[in-house]
Amino acid sequence: MAHQVPILRRPVHRGSVGMAETIKLEVARYSPERDAAPRFETFQVPLRKEWVVLDALNYIKDRLDGSLTFRWSCRMGICGSCGMMVNGEPKLTCATFLADYAPAPVRVEPLRYFPIVRDLVIEMTDFLRKLRAMKPWIIRKEEKSLPEGEYLQTPQQLDSYKQYSMCINCMLCYAACPVYGLDPLFSGPAAIALAQRYNLDSRDEGANERFPILSQHEGIWACTFVGECTEVCPKHVDPAGAIQRYKLTAAKEWFKSLLLPWGVR
Amino acid sequence: MAGKESQVRIEPFLWTLFSAGGVVAAFLVPVHLFLWGLAFPLGWIQPPAYERIVALVAHPAARVYLFVLCSLPLFHWAHRFRYTLYDGLQIKHLNEVINFCCYGGALLGTALAGYLLWNLP
């Protein structure tokens, strides 16, 4: 009668009672040496209440197909490495729970609008170049000497830029931005939000250096205020707000340059 | 390059009109729509007498207000619709025609509003 007793039975996980035991993951695969275009491969992975999409990808890599390639590091929404398209939406896969999608299959693709290096890994050089162009660091005309002490800030001064400093460079906002999709020269949400992070810092004196980059067509003016960047931002940075605020700053500068053509920027 | 530079030169001005028009369209236009479109015709609020409205509109400040109310939302529309055509229909290559029609339409509406308000008794 041994055949009536299931010998190997996956233990039912607490919390997954009532759910299907597995979930289908449709993962985009692309190998530049083999594939002309990205294709999808389907994997069955265990569905557990506490599992995020990244856990499922690691399960595939460990147990099913070691060749699956993707970026990840911290597993806790800080490093910004594991951004991917999950069912067509830009998500941090370490913070996107499988159970929220069950029982339907979950489709995982590399971040939209970026060139694909392999499978789920995108080429981010374009973003890094744009970020660097914004000079995202504190610029001082003259540094204080060490004995003069540190640069003090009031809580209000900190609040004026703190939100923008939460950016983790995950690039979800680029994958969400239809303007970036249409115009690859657009500086993009995160780079502009980080420029504002330093512009609004009371210790910074570099706003004039950032002005020409921000106020060109490919800077803030390419933005048509779709607002999707703010919707998808996992750190609530509100890049769309940062861009609109800078549009006001740049418009004021424009009127100033009109009224004072000799210019005292 | 020259074209792009001139575009950047005028863009902050167009955006300012767009932005100001958005404020007017969001905060003032709904009040007028509510009063003249719903509350007065449905009798929720007693409408002012015709003579009182004529007296009100006779004041230059009221005319300036009505001019702003008519003009700025048109520029808001022009800017938004221009980008809708650029990106939504992806016909950015027709930008000269689009700019002419959008901002030209807003200018025409503004001129018409100015003409009518100027000639009010």
Image (cartoon, rainbow, N blue to C red):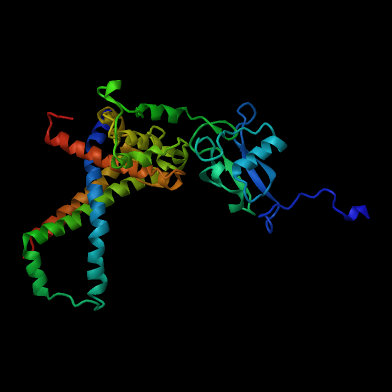
* Relative to A55, residue A208 above or below: above
Q: Is residue A106 left or right of residue A220?
A: right
Residue A218 in view in this figure: no
Image quadrant in which the N terminus of chain A is located: bottom right
Residue A18: % across, % down: 68, 59
Which residue is farthest front?
Answer: A147
Which residue is farthest right?
Answer: A1
Residue A211 in view in this figure: yes
In-front residue for pair A135/A223: A135
Image quadrant in which the C terminus of chain A is located: top left
Q: Is residue B104 left or right of residue A223?
A: left
* Relative to A64, residue B116 above or below: below
Residue A50: % across, % down: 62, 48
Q: Residue at x 69, y 35 (%)?
A: A62
Q: Which residue is drawn at 51% across and 31% down?
A: A115
Q: Which residue is drawn at 42% across and 42% down?
A: A178
Q: Is residue A241 left or right of residue A26?
A: left
User: Residue A60 sits in which quadrant?
Assistant: top right
Number of marks drawn: 0
Residue A73: % across, % down: 56, 33
Residue A44: % across, % down: 70, 45
